[in-house]
Amino acid sequence: MRLFHTFTPLSQITRCAAVLAAVLPLSGCFWFDGPQSTFDPNGPVARHQMDVFYVTCWVALFIFVVVGSVLAYAMVKFRARGEGDLHAEPPEQGHGNPVVEMSLIGASVLALVVIAVPTLREIWYTYEVPVEEKANAYEVTATGYQWWFKFDYPAETAQTLDATAKAVGAPFSTANELVIPAGRPVHINLRTVDVIHSFWIPKLAGKVDMMPNRGNHLWVQADKPGYFWGQCAEFCGESHAVMRFRVIALGPREFNDWVNAQMAPAHRVAAAAAGAGAPKAQFAAYRTFSRNEAGFTEKFDRSPLDSWRAQQLPGKDEDPALIARGRELFSSKTCASCHTIRGDGYIGVVGPELTHVGARSTIAAGLLENNRDELHRWIHAPNEVKPGNTMWVKGYLANNIKLTLEDEDALVNYLESLK
Ligand code: CUA
């Protein structure tokens, strides 16, 4: 104990080191392979950003080791060795050592240059698609809403704005699931209709803010087909923490098929065969959820991309009468004033387009898995899933909308049929 008598900082450093040594191995499991880990880059932009992070990290570690060693040396060498030392006069004070001081200034400047040069290079690189890749770049527009993301595909609109395309209802937009071609740079325009949001796909690129009255952008590229988690990274109100999205990267042919499927109007389930009987009243089988029960997200029974693909397939056990009832309710319960469903004549623009909502892997801004139970949970009490959301406040409450279990069941079946 004598050793630490005059210098308590040393014992604090020891304690800090012990805590770090205990925590680091544990945190390793979360940091390196989580769905939102920036340590697992899946594209050139994220990789370059991680490289810059490591430059700073190594420089800082080097400085820490050098300064820490000198400090430790001084503390041991000049420690109090006996009672006499504790009460001794301080040694004669000098004005400093010009050589040491100048070298320290030089070393600091050098450290800053070592960090600044690659950082500036990467800021330029990540700002815009490299010139030689520009011709190959795909363009999308992401718009932030409280609290969900809308994705537009201007390239598809331009290419297909002929009579046929208009007849089938192009252009299209998607909500909370951005589908991009893998292996190609994607230029993303960033917009917002309300407050500041921040667009972040940890495995593909760092955050860029969506600012009111300002056109920001970023670019990303996925090395290969994959399924990636995204998140709003700027506090934007009550449900900021549950403002999520997904990015699905597909090979060229699969991407083309997906675009064509999105262009098409809403899927119609064939009318019921004569004598098919009454609706099956599936609502009795819905799970009930407790308030704020953790939703989904990471529990897929197969790879997330395969789950997404399975979601594109036509539905099974569909009940045409029930679906037709849901289509009517969508209008009579005023859902259609906010949502577009191309082909069914609904053209609301306040909320997400739902023409192909059944083919998405998630609902409620990436919060819940897209299945009948969760969809039922969402339309039954949207405020319990995403507090303060527009559908609840300006839809259900403002219009005093009441849904019976039977109504909810019809709506769930209708929405799930929209592949
Ligand atoms: Cu949008 Cu936080």
Image: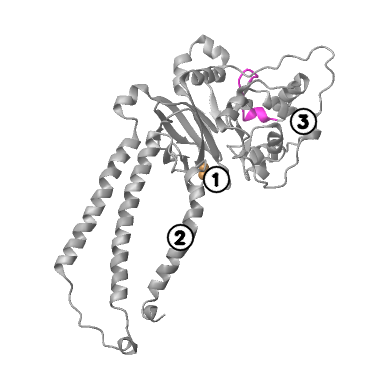
Whole-number angstrom distance, CA of label 2 to CA of label 1: 34 Å
Secondary structure of residue under mark 3: helix
Q: Earlier in the sequence, mark 2 or mark 3?
A: 2
**Residue 131: percent from the left, percent from the top?**
29, 27
- Circles 2 and 3, Cβ within 8 Å, touching? The answer is no
> Does mark 1 have its CB less than 8 Å from ligand 1?
yes
Secondary structure of residue under mark 1: helix
Give, as a three-letter code, the residue at label 1. His
Q: Earlier in the sequence, mark 3 or mark 1?
A: 1
**Residue 270: percent from the left, percent from the top?**
72, 14
Picture disc at residue 407: 3
Q: Is residue 286 left or right of residue 221?
A: right
Q: Quadrant of the C terminus?
A: top right
- Rendered position, 89 above or below 175: below
- Count neighbours of disc 1 (C-alpha within 10 A) and say few if under 14, some if 14 to 19, many if 20 or more: some
Whole-number angstrom distance, CA of label 3 to CA of label 1: 30 Å
Q: Which residue is mark 1?
A: 240
Q: Residue at x 41, y 31 (%)?
A: 221
Give, as a three-letter code, the residue at label 2. Ala
**Residue 38: percent from the left, percent from the top?**
44, 43
